[in-house]
Image (cartoon, helix red, strand yellow):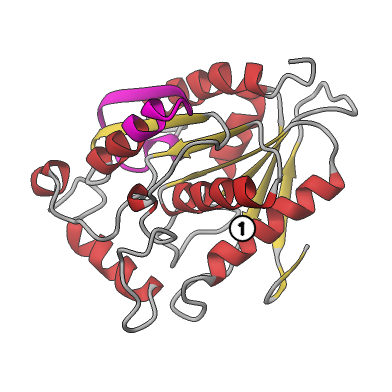
Amino acid sequence: LNGPGGWLRAREYVPPDTTDDLGTLVYFHGGGWVMGNLDTHDALCRGLTNAAGVRVVAIEYRLAPEHPHPAAIEDAWAATAWARERWKGPLAVGGDSAGGHLAITVAATAKTRGLSLAAQVLIYPVTDLSNLDTESYETFAEGYWLTRDAMVWFRDHLLPEGHPPTDPMVSPLLRPDVSGMAPAIVVLAECDVLRDEGYAYARRLEAAGGLSACLEFSGVIHGFVAMPQAIAEGRRALEQIGQALAPLMDPSS
């Protein structure tokens, strides 16, 4: 598709049984806005397609630091608008980690621009780059997998010099109003620096009537859903996401 900064690669995953009104999930990969691509999240996207019975369209958006904020957000919105024009069934957005952050910003933009979304799938999303001192950050500062230092590095590469991390487009937990957005499925990992900000965002959505499901997985690390071949809980998470997402994407509902 043709994005704001040029052509963007996308990959379409379709379940065996398709209909004209099949739902579409536009998916944004994780990787700290700096790394990741269609191949790194291929297993995750295949799993979502099979579990939910929907079309998944993975987007390879522009990465920092060559393309700092808000390039990724601009690409994510352009991809979602393109998908709405291309397919007529229910439309949802989703992503993991940095991709979860992009999905949140798209859902918020859709609310203000009048684009109807059926759901948002937020897998251990980044929701607050202004506070890297939560309890989960303290507990898992040195890992496993994702560390506090890594998040600082990602943040520094994402944001242009002088751009405040308190900007609600960067830290959606700080948005004054989270009501009126598509129903959200939030997935959290116990051993993850992002756990607490994910909980906090889920609680705000719940208070605003916008939380469809909060799926919590014990004893697992950041990134586990993207490794279903190696981590059994990753496979279970995909199954549970599919069970929660399928009814939201039912064209007859």
- Give the residue pinned by disc 1: 76
Residue 90 lies in magenta, yes or no? no
Q: Residues within 10 Å of mark 1 (few under 14, many from 20)?
A: many
Q: Position of residue 133 (x, y in %)?
A: 13, 53
In what quadrant of the picture does the C terminus appear?
Answer: top right
Q: What's the residue type where badge 1 is placed?
A: Ala
Q: Which residues are magenta?
A: 203-227
The one of 66 and 128 positioned closer to us in this rendering: 128
Q: Is residue 230 left or right of residue 27?
A: left
Q: Is residue 207 left or right of residue 9?
A: left
**Residue drawn 34% across the image and 38% down it:** 201
Q: Is residue 201 above or below residue 129?
A: above
Q: Is residue 192 above or below residue 133?
A: above
Q: Is residue 235 above or below residue 10?
A: above
Quarter of the view holding residue 37: bottom right
**Residue drawn 27% across the image and 70% down it:** 153
Q: Position of residue 238 (x, y in %)?
A: 50, 26
Quarter of the view holding residue 14: top right
Q: Secondary structure at mark 1?
A: helix
Q: Position of residue 229 (x, y in %)?
A: 46, 32
Which residue extends farthest bottom? 161
Q: Is residue 213 above or below residue 111?
A: above
